């Protein structure tokens, strides 16, 4: 069920539980700012989630509240993961769903990295 991006952070969401080690993940990368892991229901041959370690509900919350160091660390980590997975050439899709209309289902900021095949158009007209 999509969430309201203005809702308070839920410390029991699945990503918070993964960060606490309560739920295992297939880790791709980790540093002081982020954890990246394979999606359990991949939508492409490569489907990785990159999440900040701090408690941010959405991109809006993160961009308004995170420190410059956190923002730079997150953006750099997304690029690092894409390079490490060999996605830069031939290309990949990066997506962050925000709020109900954007289809966000977990109330913790996360970026999806998709690759490994041609992905086509993202949104069809109509």
Image (cartoon, rainbow, N blue to C red):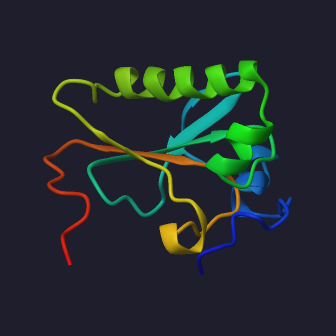
| Residue at 58% from the left image edge and 74% from the top image edge | 100
Q: Find residue 43 and report its horizontal and vertical position in percent.
A: 32, 60
Between 58 and 17, the one lying in front of the other is 58
Residue 62, how many percent across, how many down?
71, 42
| Residue 78 in sight | yes
Q: Based on the displayed image, in which of its 4 quarters is residue 93 positioned?
A: top left
Q: Is residue 32 visible?
A: no
Which x, y percent locates residue 108? 70, 55
Residue placed at 60% from the left, 81% from the top? 1
The residue sitting at 72% across, 56% down in the picture is 23
Could you tell me which residue is drawn at 83 percent across and 63 percent down? 10
Q: Locate the C terminus by quadrant.
A: bottom left
Q: Where is residue 41, by image quadrant?
A: bottom left
Q: Position of residue 54 (x, y in %)?
A: 80, 39
Q: Is residue 7 left or right of residue 85?
A: right
Q: How many marks?
A: 0
Closer to us: 68 or 41: 68
Would you place residue 103 above or below residue 118 in this image? below
């Amino acid at each position: 069920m999509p969430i309201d991006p203005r809702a308070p952070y839920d410390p029991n969401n699945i990503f918070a539980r993964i960060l606490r080690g309560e739920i295992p993940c297939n880790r791709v990368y980790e540093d002081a700012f982020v954890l990246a892991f394979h999606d359990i229901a991949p939508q492409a041959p490569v489907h990785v989630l990159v999440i900040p370690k701090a408690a941010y509900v959405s991109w809006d919350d993160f961009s308004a509240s995170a420190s410059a160091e956190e923002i730079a660390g997150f953006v750099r980590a997304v690029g690092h993961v894409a390079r490490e997975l060999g996605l830069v050439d031939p290309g990949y899709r990066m997506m962050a769903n925000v709020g109900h209309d954007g289809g966000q289902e977990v109330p913790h900021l996360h970026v999806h990295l998709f690759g490994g095949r041609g992905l086509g158009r993202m949104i069809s007209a109509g």
